[in-house]
Image: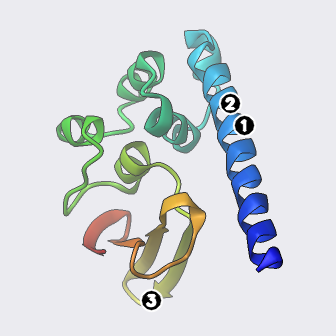
Amino acid sequence: MKRCVMEIMLRSIVIILLSGLIVFLNGCISTMSPEALKSEDSYDLCKYYASSKSENVKLELIWRGAIPDNEWPLIEKKLIQLGMSELGLVCSWGIPNQINKTVVRWGTRKQWIYCPYGYYNSHDCQYVYTDNGKITAWQN
């Protein structure tokens, strides 16, 4: 019993520390100048956009043409759809807990695993499948 309580306390502390780190990093990106944003990778910008919704980050991604125009309304509502780009998925839902990658004759298939609070409980996780960079299916 005592060990279980200690594990719960430790997990809570880790979650609080990680949350603080994310807030700190988001603050750094969202306050960056437009010139500094240009040096960031689009994937990293989408990671930050998913949690901060920074208008500067969105404008940089739009300027690059990194996300198709028809995906932005979905991203802003944290939604996904079939045919959406992997980058759109990251902008909408953030970074997954894990990505499993399979290389097949016709291309690359990925399984993106999103679990709340980082816990791998198959009942709570959502799985998104992409083929050659586009969402082809999901399950929860």
Secondary structure of the residue carrying tag 3 is: strand
Q: Quadrant of residue 44?
A: top right
Q: Is residue 18 left or right of residue 96?
A: right
For the point 28% across and 34% down, which residue is it? 76
Three-letter amino acid code of the residue under disc 2? Leu
Q: Is residue 63 above or below residue 107?
A: above
Q: In the image, which is nearer the foreground, mark 2 or mark 3?
A: 2
Residue 25's disc is: 2
Three-letter amino acid code of the residue under disc 3? Val
Residue 21's disc is: 1
Whole-percent x and y of residue 38? 58, 22
Q: Is residue 41 above or below residue 11?
A: above
Q: Is residue 5 left or right of residue 131?
A: right
Residue 75's disc is: none
Q: Quadrant of residue 41?
A: top right
| Residue to which mark 3 is pinned | 104
For the point 37% across and 53% down, which residue is it? 89
Q: Is residue 5 above or below residue 104?
A: above
For the point 37% across and 84% down, which residue is it? 106
Nearer-the-camera pick, 28 or 120? 120
Q: Is residue 70 left or right of residue 24?
A: left
Whole-percent x and y of residue 115? 48, 66
Q: In the image, which is nearer the foreground, mark 1 or mark 2?
A: 1
Q: Are marks 1 and 2 in contact (CB under 8 Å)?
A: yes
Three-letter amino acid code of the residue under disc 1? Leu
